[in-house]
Amino acid sequence: MSGFLDGYGESDARRERNIKRIVASALLAAAVVFGGWLFFKDFREKRQVSRFFDLLRTGSYDEAYRMWGCDPAKPCRDYNRDKFLEDWGPNSPHARQIASSMRVRRIRSCQEGIIAVVEFAPGDEVFLYVDRAKRELSFSPWGYCMDAAGRNTNFWDRFFP
């Protein structure tokens, strides 16, 4: 009689273990995909911001001006090259910090682009906006993403400014 019921329930236990492994593997794969998406969703825009400051550090002001969608030969109407150099050039108020203590403190992901909160000194921040479609930089008038009614669209920004 010892051989008749020895295998009772083994197939159910094996099936249960396999289902647990499949579910755990699927959850792990979903977590890896979600983490990759969170890490890479603003990758190109973050690279634009870091490339912009790298160009400023090396003194390539014409190339940095082109990242704003402007050209030294055909400057933008509201942001000419002289104004750009006043804001970002070697005699700008932030020239020393760009080379040494400047850091991107926060990236806020909006629907059409990102807002980079650039900190030059404690309390001295500039908000840069990078458009997703054109990957052009501009100043952001607000430090957070807004909808058409002027409300903050990022839920977490209400709790973690």
Image (cartoon, rainbow, N blue to C red):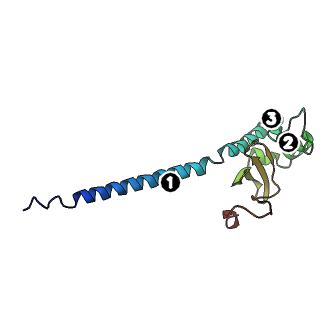
Could you say which is closer to the camera, residue 22 or residue 58? 22
Work out whether mark 1 precedes mark 3 in sequence or the reverse, and give the earlier one: 1
**Residue behind mark 3:** 63
Callout 1: SS: helix
Up-down relation of residue 93 to residue 60 (above or below) = below
> For the residue marked with disc 2, what is the amino acid?
Gly
The image quadrant where one finds the N terminus is bottom left
Could you say which is closer to the camera, residue 94 or residue 117? 117
Numbered mark located on residue 31 in the image: 1
Residue 93 place in picture, x, y as percent = 85, 49
> For the residue marked with disc 1, what is the amino acid?
Ala
Image quadrant of residue 65?
top right
Image quadrant of residue 135?
top right
How far apart in space, not on screen, are marks 1 and 3 (Cα)? Answer: 39 Å
Up-down relation of residue 146 to residue 101 (above or below) = below
Work out whether mark 3 precedes mark 2 in sequence or the reverse, and give the earlier one: 3
